[in-house]
Image: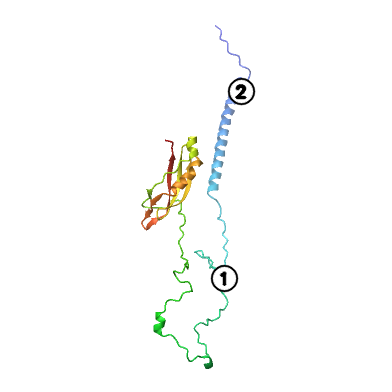
């Protein structure tokens, strides 16, 4: 029996050996280059985080105390309002004795005694009480309260007036609901009415007219009655 060797081109064995040699060499070189690049990257990052070299020089400037000026104020200072000063006023002449010549004095002139002076009534400006004269009296005007006023006891309605159903709405078969905002003063009276929400404007005036006739007990706080705003709903339904 004859054994036949496979055909190999000239130099094939040598080429395989050379190929394996250089392939291994190339892998080693690539690995070295890869780790070198990683080392350079991490080294640069470390050097940037930890500055290497002498610290920067600090420049110190010497300033004289006279150049600093006055220190700023801690608390804000308000400028006092300017007050206009009037010119010199002439001295009053009331009550100052004036010399009178003896020839001008009437010897028969009499003066009222202390008893007669005490019996006379107070001097008025010519308008006596009871003769139709008017006296101006300052009346405190109550301002509307803010939207929210704290209170311990809320107002309680003691007089309720149902709004009149508008005739046009009855004929048209309209129904709806209106929420009114009432200003109840310190006496429990309704001073002002605002419409917060309304299903139809045809009901608004009827609600305002009825709400103004409401009477409440005033809202109470520990210091006394307070003026508040409250919301009251009104319903319009056909029977």
Q: Position of residue 202 (x, y in %)?
A: 50, 41
Q: In which quarter of the image is the N terminus?
A: top right
Tag 1 secondary structure: helix
Dot 2 corresponds to which residue?
15
Mark toward the start of the polypeptide (2 vs 1): 2
What residue is rendered at 49% in x and 38% in y? 169
Q: How crowded is mark 2: few (under 14 residues within 10 Å), some or many (20 or more)?
A: few
Q: Residue lying furthest right in this view? A: 10
Coloring applied to the structure: rainbow
Q: Can residue 48 be seen at all in this image of the molecule? A: yes
Against 112, is 2 above or below? above
Q: Position of residue 175 (x, y in %)?
A: 46, 37
Mark 2 or 1, closer to the camera: 1
Q: Can residue 148 be seen at all in this image of the molecule? A: no
Q: How far apart are marks 2 and 1 (CA)?
A: 92 Å
Against 119, is 192 above or below? above
Residue 161 shown left or right of residue 61 in the figure: left
Tag 2 secondary structure: helix
What residue is rendered at 40% in x and 50% in y? 215
Dot 1 corresponds to which residue?
66
Against 234, is 15 above or below? above
Q: Quadrant of residue 87?
A: bottom right
Residue 216 shown left or right of residue 205 in the figure: left
Q: In which quarter of the image is the C terminus?
A: top left
Which residue is nearer to you in this view: 23 or 57? 57
Q: How crowded is mark 1: few (under 14 residues within 10 Å), some or many (20 or more)?
A: few
Q: Residue lying furthest bottom in this view? A: 102
Residue 206 shown left or right of residue 66 in the figure: left
Q: Position of residue 39 (x, y in %)?
A: 54, 41
């Amino acid at each position: 029996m004859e054994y036949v060797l496979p055909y190999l081109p000239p130099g094939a064995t040598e080429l395989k050996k050379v190929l394996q040699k250089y392939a291994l060499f190339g892998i080693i070189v690539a690995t070295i280059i890869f780790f070198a690049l990683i080392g350079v990257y991490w080294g640069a990052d470390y050097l940037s985080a930890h500055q290497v070299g002498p610290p920067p020089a600090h420049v110190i400037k010497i300033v004289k105390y006279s150049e600093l000026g006055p220190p700023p104020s801690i608390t804000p200072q308000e400028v006092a309002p300017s007050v206009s000063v009037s010119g010199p006023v002439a001295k009053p002449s009331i009550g100052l004795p004036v010399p009178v010549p003896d020839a001008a004095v009437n010897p028969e002139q009499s003066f009222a005694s202390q008893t007669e002076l005490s019996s006379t009534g107070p001097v008025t400006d010519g308008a006596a009480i009871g003769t139709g004269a008017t006296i101006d009296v300052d009346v405190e005007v109550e301002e509307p309260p803010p939207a929210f006023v704290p209170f311990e006891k809320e107002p309680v309605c003691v007089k309720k007036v149902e709004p009149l159903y508008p005739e046009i709405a009855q004929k048209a078969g309209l129904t709806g609901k209106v929420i009114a905002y009432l200003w109840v003063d310190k006496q429990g009276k309704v001073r002002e009415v605002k419409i917060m929400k309304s299903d139809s404007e045809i009901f608004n005036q009827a609600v305002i007219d009825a709400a103004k006739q409401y009477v409440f007990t005033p809202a109470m706080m520990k210091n006394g009655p307070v003026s508040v705003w409250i919301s009251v709903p009104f319903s319009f339904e056909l029977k």
